[in-house]
Amino acid sequence: MPTDRALCHGDEDMRDERTVAEDARQEANAETTRRADRDTSRIRWLRDQVTRLHKRLPLRRRFAGGLAHGIMSSVAAIAAYLPTQLLGLQEGFWAAITAVAVAQTEFGATRSTARDQFTGAAIGGLIGLAAYLTLGPSVPTYALGVVLAILACWLLNVASACRLAGITATIILLVPHLGPVERMAGSRVLEVGWGVSVAIVTVWLVTRVNRWLGVKL
């Protein structure tokens, strides 16, 4: 029947269109993956080039840059540590550690590191706390908590924060503590947040003063 043939041809055309569309989607996904791989390779290459350039700096420049970085990190760490008791944070050394980890000679690098530090602490703290409360403290719980913390960072597109997320989950799930685990998790996030804030303010002030004085590191 002509009508049946027309219907068959219509079905075949629809199948062909769906196949073409699916092929196009797969090709687009493959191209996106290839582009992401190329971008990752370029970023690694640029990072390696920057590292090589830093190593080629003369001794005087390396001494000046290292001394400035060390003094700035020390100031940020002390400024982060001293008020912790007044803020009710029992282990203020975490704020000092965070300030040292975040402080960089360039403000842009400091902001990027600060974002990673706080995001990682928040994700690791939440997942570590959830794992502790739901499954209880144990080695399998710890292993699962680290996996989930790092996976969450990748899924949220903040893979650069995954190391601190895993470290924070480790602290919550392995380090002995007094009092409720909820308080410890909250303290870790607050201490990291305070250390991040102090480091950002310190580097911003130093950057402004250096710009005003015409000093280049």
Image: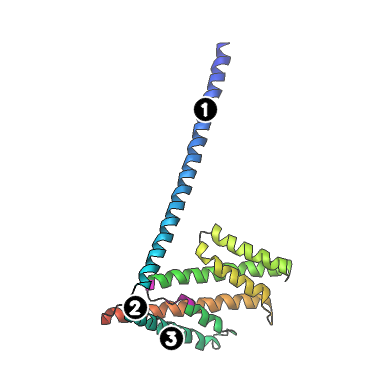
Element type at mark 3 = helix
Q: Quadrant of the N terminus?
A: top right
| Residue 148 in view in this figure | yes
Residue 134 in view:
no
| Disc 1 from disc 2: Cα separation | 61 Å
Q: Earlier in the sequence, mark 3 or mark 1?
A: 1
Amino acid identity at mark 1: Asp
| Left or right, residue 134 beside residue 47 | right
The location of residue 148, given as percent across then percent down, is 63, 62
- Classify 10 Å Cα crowding around label 1: few (below 14), some (14-19), many (20 and above): few
Compared to residue 35, the image places residue 109 above or below, namely below
Point out which mark residue 135 bears. none
Q: Residue at x 53, y 32 (%)?
A: 19
For the record, the magenta segment spans: 101-107
Q: 32 or 135: nearer the eye?
A: 32
Q: Quadrant of the C terminus?
A: bottom left
The residue carrying mark 1 is 16
Q: Secondary structure at mark 2?
A: helix
Give the residue type that dot 2 points to.
Thr
Number of marks drawn:
3
At a point 41% along the width and 83% down the height, the residue shown is 72
Asked if labels 2 and 3 touch by Cβ distance under 8 angstroms, the answer is no
Label 3 and label 1: CA atoms lie apart by 67 Å
